[in-house]
Amino acid sequence: MGKKFYWINLALILIVVYLAVKNYEEWTSPMPRPKETAEVKAKPTSPSSLLTAAKKGEAPPPDNYKVISEKNLFSIERKEFPPPLPPPEPVAKDKVSAPPKPPARPNLTLYGVAIVGEDIRTALISNPTRRADKGERETMTVRVGDKVGEYSVRQILEDRITMESTGDSCDVLLFDPAKQKKRAVVGPAAPPTGPAGKPAEPPRVAPVQPRPVTPASPPTLQPPRPQPTPGTTPSPRDLLRERLERRRLLTGPTTVPQTPTQPVQPTRRLPVPPKQGEDEEEEDDE
């Protein structure tokens, strides 16, 4: 029995020594390089091929790692590499380019049209796009051929004007209910305001006391004077009286309405002294 176990132990010792030698050779021997074939040199390696080779356990060739050193992210001499532009899309031959859009129509208002014969035709329009700070007036007079923005006046009729541009035309009516024309509105004058913004009070008028008016005395009726006989000369006294009566008849009595506040007392009329010439004539007559 002892000889049998001796041979078994000797065989096990030999096996252990053999495995130890092989293990040492495996760890100490250099890694053999894979053989480069013509197919590997012809086909460039891609990340997908490297990934599949790594999954299969095959080591990629060292030349594939040169790109890492050439394109070092932290290199001082690194340059920016623009990304490649996408290829241009092929233009379809059957596709027809769309026509250009017409320009925006101007918001014009027609105020009047003047037509003199067949040659002179003008129109008064309002263009709100004109700026007053640049010295431009909102209202302007145009003729056939004048340009307003990107449109030009093609025709001027009695009730409208025709504006034309590239691929578009429009009419501006004189009586257009859709457009309200600006007109000056005259309103009542605002009352004057005081310093605090309050309306000022109207000026006060002092009451006027009525003054008593002395009515004129009614004309005294005198009997008709006898007409002088023909052939006799009237005296200067008669001529003077006749003149006074004529003057009274021409001027007439002046009547002024009396105020009921105060009674008016009639004033006595003073006698008129005769003139010296009349006195002398009376004395001579006597």
Image: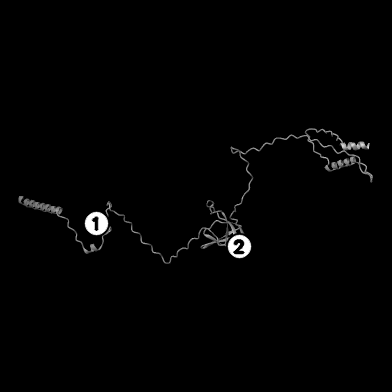
Give the amino acid type for the residue marked by disc 2 in the picture: Ile
Q: Position of residue 86 (x, y in %)?
A: 35, 60
Q: Is 98 left, or right, of 251 in this rendering?
A: left
Q: Is 284 left, or right, of 191 in this rendering?
A: right
Count residues near mark 1 (Cα–Cα under 10 Å), then give few for <14, some for 14-19, many for 20+: few
Q: Tell us which disc is closer to us: 1 or 2.
A: 2
Q: Position of residue 43 (x, y in %)?
A: 25, 62
Q: Is 94 left, or right, of 84 in this rendering?
A: right
- What residue is shown with label 1? 66
Which dot marks residue 216?
none
Residue 161 visible from this viewpoint: yes
Q: Secondary structure at mark 2?
A: strand
Which of the pair 188/255 is nearer the observer? 255
Which of the pair 27/157 is nearer the observer? 157
Q: Secondary structure at mark 1?
A: helix
Count residues near mark 2 (Cα–Cα under 10 Å), then give few for <14, some for 14-19, many for 20+: few
Q: Position of residue 80 (x, y in %)?
A: 31, 55
Residue at image point 90% right, 36% down: 280
Q: Position of residue 61 (x, y in %)?
A: 22, 58
Which of the pair 257/95 is nearer the observer? 257
Badge 1 vs badge 2, beta-carbon distance below 8 Å: no
- Whichever of callouts 1 and 2 sits on the residue coming sooner in the sequence is 1
CA distance separating discs 1 and 2: 87 Å
- The number of discs equals 2
Give the amino acid type for the residue marked by disc 1 in the picture: Lys
- What residue is shown with label 2? 120
Residue 250 in the image: above or below residue 121: above
Q: Please, which residue is most extreme toward the bottom here?
A: 94
